[in-house]
Image (spheres, rainbow, N blue to C red):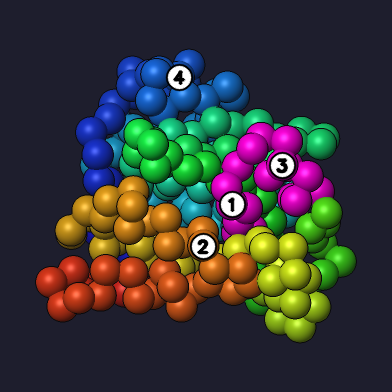
């Protein structure tokens, strides 16, 4: 299926992570029908997440799909959302090396970008502290550059595009990354698409980029 990412871990419509939650992939909010693509099909629909990132009328769909994408990478995912809360809380369970990250998802119309007026870095910093998370990551279709990046660096917030995460999932499908390797996605303040692009590029993991 051109333009799709192969699912990387088992799941089905009755999988606890697809609705009520289990001990590992805990979720508090039932994901949208779009998010169930991860459990009802052997393929993850890149087409759907690409469409969702530009649907400013239903940001919850984008948040749900991003959460399920991270779940497929091996993270525990908790959907929060709402006023005063991060959209998603991730946990990379590694015993004494366990780490967590708050995720803020921003939609924008096609051919548009997320600029400084759309982002409250102070709130993201507060979310990170409130949930005692190690990292904060902002995900969007595209960023304007300039102040939106400068403020992210200042407040130690990572920034990543949807396409960068899709690319990571495609490579994870071929040669699964460990949660230790995936930690690099969150460690760089500011735009970190370059980190995502280089992740695991040791020759053995190299695969094609997502098809349009």
Classed neighbour count for the residue bearing mark 4: other residues with Cα under 10 Å, few (<14), some (14–19), many (≥20): some
Pointer 3 or 4: first along the chain: 4
Which is closer to the viewer, label 3 or label 4?
A: 3
Q: Circle 4 is placed at which residue position?
A: 21
Residue located 68% across and 44% down the image: 128
Which is closer to the viewer, label 4 or label 2?
A: 2
Pointer 3 or 1: first along the chain: 3
182 is higher (above) or lower (below) than 116: above
Residue located 48% across and 16% down the image: 20
Work out how far the residue at label 4 is from the one at label 1, CA to CA, in angstroms: 23 Å
Pointer 1 or 2: first along the chain: 1
Work out how far the residue at label 1 is from the one at label 2, CA to CA, in angstroms: 7 Å
Asked if the residue at tag 2 contacts the one at tag 1, i.e. Cβ–Cβ closer than 8 Å, the answer is: yes
Q: Secondary structure at mark 4?
A: loop
Q: Position of residue 97 (x, y in %)?
A: 39, 42
Asked if the residue at tag 1 contacts the one at tag 3, i.e. Cβ–Cβ closer than 8 Å, the answer is: no
Q: Circle 2 is placed at which residue position?
A: 187
Which is closer to the viewer, label 4 or label 1?
A: 1
199 is higher (above) or lower (below) than 181: below
Q: Secondary structure at mark 1?
A: strand
Q: Circle 1 is placed at which residue position?
A: 135
Q: Secondary structure at mark 3?
A: helix
Classed neighbour count for the residue bearing mark 1: other residues with Cα under 10 Å, few (<14), some (14–19), many (≥20): many
Q: Secondary structure at mark 2?
A: helix
Residue located 29% across and 38% down the image: 41
Q: Which residues are magenta?
A: 123-139
């Amino acid at each position: 299926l051109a333009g799709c990412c192969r699912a990387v871990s088992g799941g089905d419509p009755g999988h606890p992570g697809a609705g009520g939650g289990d001990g590992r992939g805990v979720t508090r909010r039932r994901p949208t029908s779009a998010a169930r693509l991860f459990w009802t099909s052997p393929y993850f629909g890149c087409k759907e997440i690409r469409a969702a990132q530009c649907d400013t009328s239903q940001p919850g769909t984008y948040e749900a799909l991003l959460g399920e994408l991270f779940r497929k990478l091996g993270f525990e995912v908790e959907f929060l959302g709402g006023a005063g809360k991060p959209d998603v809380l991730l946990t990379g369970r590694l015993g004494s090396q366990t780490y967590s990250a708050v995720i803020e998802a921003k939609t924008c119309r096609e051919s548009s970008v997320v600029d400084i007026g759309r982002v409250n870095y102070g709130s993201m910093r507060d979310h990170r502290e409130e949930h005692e998370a190690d990292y904060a990551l902002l995900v969007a279709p595209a960023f304007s550059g300039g102040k939106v990046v400068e403020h992210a660096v200042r407040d130690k917030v990572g920034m990543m595009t949807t396409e960068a995460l899709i690319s990571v999932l495609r490579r994870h499908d071929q040669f699964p990354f460990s949660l230790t390797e995936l930690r690099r996605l969150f460690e760089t303040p500011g735009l970190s698409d370059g980190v995502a692009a280089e992740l695991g590029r040791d020759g053995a993991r190299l695969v094609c980029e997502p098809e349009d």
